[in-house]
Amino acid sequence: MRVLVVEDEPYLAEAVRAGLVLAAIAADVVGDGDAALAAIDVNSYDVIVLDRDIPGTHGDEVCRILSARPERPAILMLTAARRMNDKVGGLELGADDYLTKPFDFPELTARIRALGRRIFTAHPPQLTAGGVTLDPFRHEVFRDGRFVRLGRKEFAVLEVLLRARGGVVSAETLLEKAWDENANPFTNSVKATMSTLRRKLGEPWLIRTEAGVGYAIDNAAG
């Protein structure tokens, strides 16, 4: 999952980004509405965490612009505007969820996960294939009942592959979904992460390589 955090307070923005990374969620940060719209036009995001009172294009206008698009990320407004009419107004603009500051980080992460799951056409909370079970909320992976300890990138890559339901996912898409905008597309990060992930999951190999195309979950494994 990849998230864009739109927040003009640098310390809060970095704290949210760092917390999401710890939860195996790739996150980019911008500080104003114009930068947010530009980033959304370039990158594929699953969820936008959007402050309302931001420089440049106001958060409300960003929400309104995105809501008019046939395909767009889910929008979570994260703002200090906490009155009931503020919340109603934000939702009427097209926001999918609304959370006020100050907030508890576990709740923010849970809401982002819930929005991401809704965008992924209502996938179940737990993802399974080939004897592997991944729980995005508990950040746990089991294979045939054995707990598998994964690093954040390994977890994120496995989640993207499982959500593809056996479809082939290119290395470029994995970089886009599991890494942030600072990822170097010319490195072997995906290949190295995939090698470690396969080793930790063990045999029979769950992930197959489609030469020149990408990677896919082998649903016959297990």
Image (spheres, helix red, strand yellow):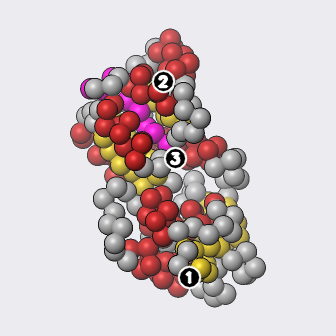
Q: What SS does tag 3 mark?
A: loop
Give the CA distance from mark 3 to mark 2: 17 Å
Looking at numbered disc 1 in the image, what kind of residue is underneath it? Answer: Ala
Residue extending farthest front? 212
When the figure is inspected, residue 117 is found, relative to residue 165, above or below; the finding is above
Q: Nearer the viewer, residue 136 or 116?
A: 116
Quick check: is 17 in the magenta stretch?
Answer: no
Q: What segment carries the magenta color? A: 47-55
- The mark nearer the N terminus, 3 or 2, is 3
| Few, some or many residues within 10 Å of mark 1 (<14, 14–19, 20+) | few
Q: Residue at x 37, y 43 (%)?
A: 39
Instruction: Estimate the x, y position of residue 174 in percent, counting from the top left.
Output: 49, 65
Q: Read off the residue under disc 3.
A: 46
Instruction: Estimate the x, y position of residue 73 in percent, counting from the top left.
Output: 52, 40
Disc ID at residue 64: 2
Looking at numbered disc 3 in the image, what kind of residue is underneath it? Answer: Asp
